[in-house]
Image (tube, rainbow, N blue to C red):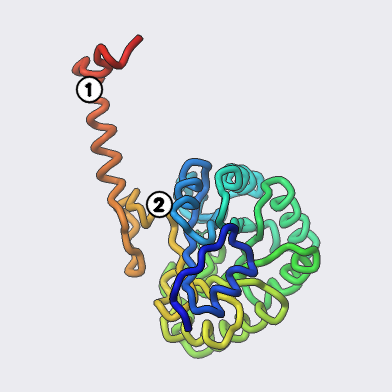
Amino acid sequence: MSTAKKSYSRVTTHTLAEMKQNGEKISMLTAYDYTLAGLVDQAGTDVILVGDSASNVIAGHETTLPITLDEMIYHASSVIRAVKRALVVVDLPFGTYQADSKEALRSAIKIMKASGAHAVKLEGGNEERQSIERILQAGIPVMGHLGLTPQSIYKFGTYTVRAKEEAEAKKLIEDAKMLEEIGCFALVLEKIPAHLAERVAQELHIPVIGIGAGGGVDGQVLVLHDMLGMSKEFSPRFLRRYADLHTVITAAVSQYSKDVKSKNFPNEKEQY
Ligand code: KIV
């Protein structure tokens, strides 16, 4: 397997399949707005996820449940306007696909038409099979999401590691195989034991992208605001902070306030 990085001018679902075949790891990050999506794209990220984690990091909700379809479309449209290379995947928010497959298809079509995104992601295995099949039949690429599925937080009760027990691990493997069989182009595995995630990635032909699922999968995803260190509060073991923007931003803003109050800003060169 070659690890040399081929340069892709536009990442598609086919590119991701090729990357898995070539043993090239896939990088994926969330983005929710024009400015940051542009930076994430220019830095060479392969997949940008307009995640329903916008409900937490942008809107300040405790869970992902409150965000609406129209809010997701607003975020996705802003991201799409900035992105030139990455594949843009949008989360179907809670309550827009679980009731029945027709509603799921309507939600997916609305997101694709209104935002110009390239694919949708939704949480769940066999229980969502009909919805996923219907969306796929309409020609919309679907990324699956198993393991810790935050839209079911009130069922789980906690955000701890999933599928540690044999029965849950067995169901996850069955669900992953089913998602591949019906035509999902990729799968996210969230917060499950690394050995289980590695096994799924080895047994599936489609790319498996992990978050808190170890290094044996085909790619990694993180929430942008978490990896940039925008907040000091959220510190799960799997999170690597690549910057400390919390410190950088609070220092800059506090200096600005001091400069305004001390009449240091604006100076003579900063006025007309
Ligand atoms: O919404 C999100 O950010 C996600 C990732 C954690 C995979 O679904």
State the residue in front, 2 or 121.
Answer: 2
Q: Secondary structure at mark 2?
A: helix
**Res. 225 mark:** 2
Query: In the rendering, at what x and y percent does residue 248 appear?
Result: 27, 42
In the image, taking residue 115 as reference, residue 16 lies left or right, namely left
Which residue is at a point 49% across and 79% down the rendered structure image?
A: 23
Image vertical order of residue 163 relative to residue 251, above or below: below
Callout 1 crowding tier (Cα within 10 Å): few <14, some 14–19, many ≥20: some
Of callouts 1 and 2, the N-terminal one: 2
Which residue in the protein does label 1 denote? 259
* The image quarter in which residue 176 lies: bottom right
Which residue is at a point 71% across and 74% down the rendered structure image?
A: 129
Is residue 41 visible in the rendered structure shown here? yes
Looking at the figure, which quarter contains the C terminus? top left
* The image quarter in which residue 13 lies: bottom right
Which residue is at a point 52% across and 61% down the rendered structure image?
A: 46
State the residue in front, 165 or 130.
Answer: 130
In the displayed image of the protein, which residue is found farthest to the top? 272
Q: Secondary structure at mark 1?
A: helix
Which residue is at a point 30% across and 16% down the rendered structure image?
A: 270
